[in-house]
Image (tube, rainbow, N blue to C red):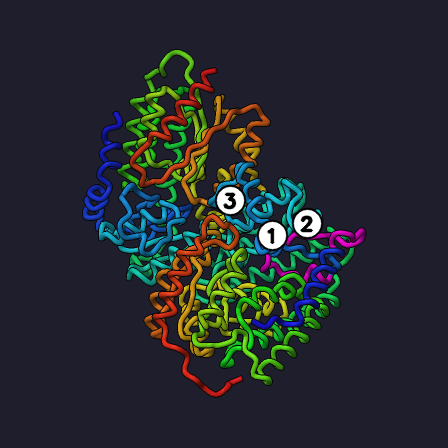
């Protein structure tokens, strides 16, 4: 499988990001969730640090389990999110890559990825003795509406006051606007990259997406992020022009629903490629690629921003999730879909059995559910998963040979 | 003295059916937790609280994964078996990730109407209030559609008085338990509280008043017995209280979502319903599922334990309950720092073997007896 050359650039910018965060004397550090509105922080020269991203790094580098063990030995139940357990363990043992995370001055969490983050961040706030700001983004049972937008906007305005108070200077609205434009540009680039997955054969795999999503999550709102995705997009487009596909021979095309199984990324990538199955789209990576539902119409940038932070995939009601999955299956010419029933992510996973049934009913495409966990290796079996996947591959009709549609 | 309450908890379906026929009101199943049932009553509904049950899971596994809690599973099992035929609609809140998604499953699998109260969790107070206003409007409208009856200022005031009276009487019962440990058996106590989930208010309030009258002249058992406070989400399986009775351990207070966290709520203010619901949700005993920066669970549980003169705290953990599991380690650490012994039991509502729990409780009781 060809690797994107841009990866060395990504490694460089991610290293620079961690080095700056670990050495800065001037800039405050905020620990934030992956769905937090970081543009407010970027505007005030605050470095956002992502414990989720760090936990994923630990799992990918196979250092996660010893950290999880440490957290469990300290009393944290196996029932809680394995990202949280990984990070708790890293903090307790000073373990994990890059020697742990820089200490936070405050915490910012948003409930658009789960309600669990409140519990996680409350625990961090208590241990680190730092303030916690919560931006609550309620679950969208039936799409966006004015009260939920107003609710978020009011919290955004309060966040500005909180940051001004914390940094002892007025909130920088000019920088904030610049940051929003940078986010919009990077988001558009990221979406364009992911949309190339619609090409047959696909030049990009969801496994690539899981790896290359680090900047859109951690450096959103910066020029560095925009520049990186320009580079990656150019490389992906060249692949399309040159007829280079992400896997050597593409027979099946599927989407991946839920977080990756970080500790099996490499093995599963290889396994899918051997089985001639390209994972051309993922609901997880797409959540950072702009609206998945009808965009909210408003001239107010706060309202638009609220609508975007509210409408990530797992904050959507099931009707919208099903609509989106069906749309992905159609636009990507998929032959089936894979759902990761993730023990650590209830909002993504509970109800999945029903979703699978309805999506298959609507599209006629087979779906498979894999029982696993994003970080906890004990919840996964190679043999069981691969045997089930083999049966699934056999159940799919190969993709129809069609002209390149990109 | 308690047989009437046990009769209710042992025959829930029959009891609800019987009262539903007498009242001729639609039964609204109230999911965990904190939906203001006053609104259901005021709209002419008959609210019945669903906190899970002990049915063996035969059907719910086809909708809910193994890592989903037994509260959600057993509630869904009830509907999938056709045993919730008398429930005509459901009232949800956004208590936790599981309950949020469970509502979505119900919407697609069953045809019964639902209302949802989206509970804001923010430190931005003006945002919380205005969002709650839209939430309250939405559930009022939803309930009125279900019952085809308007919620009027009069019906709301009457309903608030009835529910307020229930919690007032329950608080008296809690107070008796605090000052006279052992006077009410543990299992009996929770049967009394649990019966209130299913009975119409007027019936239940009368039963509570009678019970309180009967308890007044009685004295607690003599001698020092271990006293504990219990913290958890749901006080089931109720059989576990029999073990505590056998061990002569007295539960003197609790921090259950369907116990004191609900009982502590004041009478719902109806002059300004939005402020009333805000007070109802956030100003009672704190809950692990309800973010409220101004209501700290640590200080609260330490104070509660000291005020009840308890010897220790038991954590009653329902497997796969993430909000509870996240809070437990630091909460236990804090209690230990205060010199308060702690222990914990892991339970499933559907469990039928209690050997491990009994062993745990026995050991804790011995520690407390010194």
Same chain check for tags 3 and 1: no
Task: Say the numbered circle drawn on residue B282.
Answer: 3
Placement of A263 over or under A285, stated as above or below: above
**Alpha carbon separation for disc pair 1 and 2:** 12 Å
Chain under callout 1: A
Task: Say the numbered circle drawn on residue A220.
Answer: none
Placement of A317 over or under A232, stated as above or below: above
Label 1 crowding class (10 Å Cα cut-off): few <14, some 14-19, many 20+? many
Circle 1: element type: helix
Report which quarter residue A195 is drawn in: bottom right
Q: Are marks 1 and 2 in contact (CB under 8 Å)?
A: no
Task: Say the numbered circle drawn on residue A101.
Answer: 2
**Alpha carbon separation for disc pair 2 and 3:** 34 Å
Label 3 crowding class (10 Å Cα cut-off): few <14, some 14-19, many 20+? some
Placement of B307 over or under B15, stated as above or below: above
Picture residue at 35% right of the left edge, 57% below the top: B143
Circle 2: element type: loop
Question: Magenta segment, which residues?
Answer: A20-43
Which is closer to the viewer, label 3 or label 1?
1
Picture residue at 63% right of the left edge, 72% below the top: A4
* Image location (x, y in percent) of residue A382: 44, 56
Picture residue at 48% right of the left edge, 53% below the top: A373
**Farthest bottom residue?**
A403
Q: Which residue is mark 1?
A: A58
Placement of A190 over or under A130, stated as above or below: below
Chain under callout 2: A
**Farthest right residue?**
A25
* Image location (x, y in percent) of residue B46: 29, 48
Q: Are marks 3 and 1 in contact (CB under 8 Å)?
A: no
């Amino acid at each position: 499988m060809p690797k994107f050359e841009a990866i060395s650039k990504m490694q460089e910018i991610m290293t620079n990001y961690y080095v700056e965060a670990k050495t800065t004397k001037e800039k405050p550090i905020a620990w934030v969730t992956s769905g937090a509105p970081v543009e407010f922080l970027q505007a005030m020269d605050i470095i956002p640090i992502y414990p989720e991203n760090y936990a994923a790094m630990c799992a990918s580098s196979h250092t996660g389990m010893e950290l999880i063990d440490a957290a469990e030995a300290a009393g944290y139940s196996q029932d809680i999110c394995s990202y949280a357990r990984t990070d708790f363990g890293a903090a307790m043992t000073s373990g994990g890559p890059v020697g742990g995370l820089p200490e936070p001055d405050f915490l910012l969490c948003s409930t658009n990825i789960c309600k669990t983050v409140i519990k996680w961040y409350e625990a961090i706030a208590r241990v680190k003795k730092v303030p916690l700001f919560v931006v609550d983004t309620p679950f969208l049972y039936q799409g966006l509406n004015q009260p939920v937008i107003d609710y978020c906007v009011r919290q955004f305005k309060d966040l500005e006051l909180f940051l001004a108070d914390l940094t002892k200077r007025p909130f920088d609205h000019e920088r904030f606007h610049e940051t929003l434009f940078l986010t919009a540009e990077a988001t558009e680039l990221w979406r364009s990259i992911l949309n190339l997955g619609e090409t047959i054969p696909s030049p990009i795999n969801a496994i690539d997406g899981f790896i290359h999503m680090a900047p859109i999550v951690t450096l959103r709102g910066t020029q560095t992020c925009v520049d990186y995705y320009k580079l990656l997009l150019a490389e992906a487009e060249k692949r399309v022009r040159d007829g280079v596909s992400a896997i050597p021979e593409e027979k099946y095309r599927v989407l991946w629903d839920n977080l990756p199984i970080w500790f099996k990324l490499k093995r599963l990538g290889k396994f899918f490629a051997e089985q001639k199955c390209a994972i051309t789209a993922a609901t997880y990576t797409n959540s950072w690629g702009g609206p998945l539902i009808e965009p909210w119409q408003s001239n107010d940038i706060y309202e638009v921003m609220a609508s975007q932070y509210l409408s990530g995939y797992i904050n959507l009601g099931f009707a919208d999730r099903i609509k989106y999955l069906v749309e992905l299956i159609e636009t990507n010419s998929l032959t089936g879909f894979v759902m990761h029933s993730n023990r650590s992510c209830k909002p993504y996973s509970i109800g999945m059995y029903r979703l699978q049934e309805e999506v298959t009913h609507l599209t006629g495409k087979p779906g498979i559910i894999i029982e696993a966990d994003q970080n906890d290796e004990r919840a996964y079996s190679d043999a069981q998963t691969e045997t089930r996947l083999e049966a699934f591959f056999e159940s799919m009709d190969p993709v129809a040979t069609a002209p390149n549609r990109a | 003295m308690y047989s009437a309450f046990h009769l209710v908890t042992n025959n829930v379906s029959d009891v609800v059916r019987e009262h539903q026929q007498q009242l001729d009101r639609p039964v609204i199943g109230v999911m965990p937790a904190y939906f203001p049932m006053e609104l259901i009553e005021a709209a002419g509904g008959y609210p019945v609280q669903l906190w899970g049950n002990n049915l063996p899971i035969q059907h719910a596994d086809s909708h809910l994964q193994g890592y989903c809690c037994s509260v959600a599973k057993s509630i869904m099992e009830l509907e999938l078996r056709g045993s919730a035929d008398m429930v005509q609609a459901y009232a949800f809140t956004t208590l936790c990730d599981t309950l949020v998604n469970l509502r979505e499953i119900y919407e697609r699998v069953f045809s019964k109407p639902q209302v949802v109260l989206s509970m804001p969790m923010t430190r931005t107070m003006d945002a919380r209030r205005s969002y709650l206003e839209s939430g309250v409007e939405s559930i009022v409208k939803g309930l009125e559609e279900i019952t085809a009856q308007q919620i009027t200022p009069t019906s709301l005031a009457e309903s608030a008085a009835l529910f307020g009276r229930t919690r007032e009487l329950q608080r008296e019962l809690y107070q008796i338990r605090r000052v006279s440990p052992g006077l009410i058996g543990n299992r009996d106590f929770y049967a009394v509280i649990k019966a209130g989930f299913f009975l119409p208010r007027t019936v239940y309030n009368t039963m509570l008043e009678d019970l309180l009258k009967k308890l007044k002249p009685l004295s607690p058992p003599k001698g020092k017995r271990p006293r504990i406070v219990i913290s958890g989400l749901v006080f089931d399986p109720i059989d576990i209280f029999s073990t505590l009775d056998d061990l002569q351990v007295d539960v003197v207070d609790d921090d259950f979502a369907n116990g004191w966290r609900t009982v502590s709520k004041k009478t719902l203010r109806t002059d300004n319903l939005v402020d009333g619901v805000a007070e109802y949700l956030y100003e009672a005993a704190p809950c692990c599922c309800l973010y409220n920066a101004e209501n700290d669970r640590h200080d609260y549980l330490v104070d509660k334990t000291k005020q009840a003169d308890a010897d220790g705290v038991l954590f009653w953990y329902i497997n796969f309950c993430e909000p509870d599991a996240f809070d437990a380690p630091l909460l236990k650490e804090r209690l230990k720092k205060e010199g308060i012994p702690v222990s914990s039991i892991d339970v499933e509502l559907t469990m039928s073997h209690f050997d491990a729990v009994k062993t745990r409780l026995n050991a804790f009781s011995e520690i407390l007896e010194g």
